[in-house]
Image: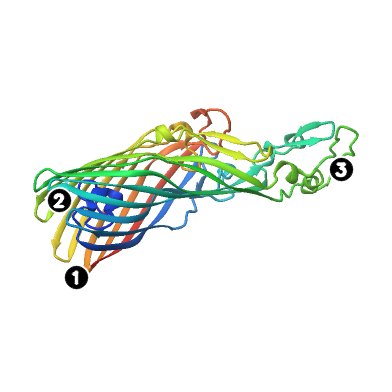
Amino acid sequence: MGRAGTGVATPCPDGSAIFFDPAGLAGLKGWHVSVGGTFIKVHGGFTGDATGAKTDLENPWVPVPHAYVAYGATPKLGVGVGLFVPYGLETNWPFSFDGRFTGYKNIIRSVYIQPTAAYQVTPRLSVGAGLDIVHGRVELNQRLDLADQVLTLPGPTIIPFTAFGITPGTDFANAHLEASQTKVTGAHFGAIVQVTDRLSIGGRYLMHAKMDYSGTATFDSVPTGIIIPTPIVLPGGLPPIPAGTPLDAVLSQFGVYSTLLPNQAVATTITNPEQFVFGVAYKLRNDLTLLADYQLTRWGKRFQTLPIVFSQPSPPSRLLYTQYNDASDFRLGAEWVKDAKLTLRGGYLYNTAAAPPQTVTPLLPEGPRNEVTAGAGIVLAPKFTLDIAYQFIKQNDRRGRTRDVSGAPVTTALNNGVYTLVGHLVAVSLAFSF
């Protein structure tokens, strides 16, 4: 992280090579154990076109763990296992935000466990590979708008709640969807070529992981506090609803929550895309290394729609169009070994946007990003090393929308404001070798 993630041509000499390039395990001596985490804080918000008012994100500091164990079994063979989180998101919006009807607290976690082996084929070529065991969890919390609902009466007669004077943006229920899955779903591969004593090149491939999540959907009532101002005449000989009646009592009387929103099973499918990474490292001096990586993430092939399938007819299942594009990461890094106890690092990244202009939503208001990094490795004792890093993210402002549309491709005509985002990442890792 300190050198902007550039690691495919020269991974750090420990178990983290499992993630950056598994071929880096070849040539390790003895045992290497490293544990740590990255703490992510995102600031941002949405400014609406209609009012010009800004709503701020309320994201907490989010911890993302990592752990690696590696062993140099022979001078040519290295083995290990790693745990890390390459994909994930968390967005938290206040209840005052119109985007709450799309999702006000949204979490995706994909924890990868990768048993890996690497072998030095020749003094110049090392290769590595392993399995991907993935545990995924998704959580979506959203408010439901009463103006989008209809009341079914005997007859049958269907009356939209807008006929009662309900205006859009009237909360009447809270939906909580949570699902998970764990599976062995793919593999990862890597290779490193030591072209000369100073120049190395490397490549890594991470297979896609299709996750079929299953879980539960629960619905809770949210009091509207609305008092019906004028009498409402109902069809089918039903008694009228007198003025002054609390709307919440009417919703209970006609079983709106039990018929429209019963608790039930829910399922969705999300495919984590494959990654291709290629890089080069050049030792300018014995103490100074320059690095450059390029990464292609195949969102365009794997994330075009997001189905939300309920087990009962109500509420109706949804199909959201995401229409993501492939994303590219360009990384430049440098590492300076100041002395035997201190190594300094720095770097720069540019990430292209995966989300197209028509599908930027509160779930993930993602866009092109410029990022700078700095870090250090400190030898605390002959067998202990502390690594620290900081990463600053500045995302370009992006126009987007606050509401999702189910069942039909969306257009930029639905965009109704601008999302802004900056991020701070602080990472720490303690490594022990013996």
Q: From what the image shows, is residue 136 above or below residue 324? A: below
Viewer-nearest residue: 289 or 109: 109
Q: Marks 2 and 1: which is nearer the front?
A: 1
Q: Residue at x 29, y 58 (%)?
A: 389
Q: Distance between the residues labelled 1 and 3?
A: 82 Å
Q: Marks 3 and 2: which is nearer the front?
A: 2
Q: Where is residue 430 in the image (x, y as percent from the top left)?
A: 29, 65
* Quarter of the image with the C terminus in it: bottom left
Task: Name which residue type carries label 3.
Answer: Pro
Q: Where is residue 210 in the image (x, y as percent from the top left)?
A: 45, 40
Task: Name which residue type carries label 1.
Answer: Pro
Which element is circle 2 on?
strand
Q: Earlier in the sequence, mark 1 or mark 3?
A: 3
Q: Where is residue 76 in the image (x, y as percent from the top left)?
A: 18, 53
Q: Residue at x 48, y 36 (%)?
A: 400
Viewer-nearest residue: 35 or 170: 35
Which element is circle 1 on?
loop
Q: Which residue is drawn at 24% across and 53% down?
A: 25
The residue that disc 2 covers is 289
Q: From what the image shows, is residue 424 above or below residue 213? A: below
Q: Marks 1 and 3: which is nearer the front?
A: 1
Q: Which of marks 3 and 2 is nearer the N terminus?
A: 3
Mark 2 neighbour density, 10 Å: few (under 14) some (14–19) many (20 or more): some
Q: Which numbered marker is on residue 382?
A: 1
Q: Can residue 304 be seen at all in this image of the molecule?
A: yes
Farthest residue, direction front = 74
Q: Where is residue 407 in the image (x, y as percent from the top left)?
A: 58, 30
Mark 1 neighbour density, 10 Å: few (under 14) some (14–19) many (20 or more): few
Q: Earlier in the sequence, mark 2 or mark 1?
A: 2
The residue that disc 3 covers is 242
Task: Name which residue type carries label 2.
Answer: Thr
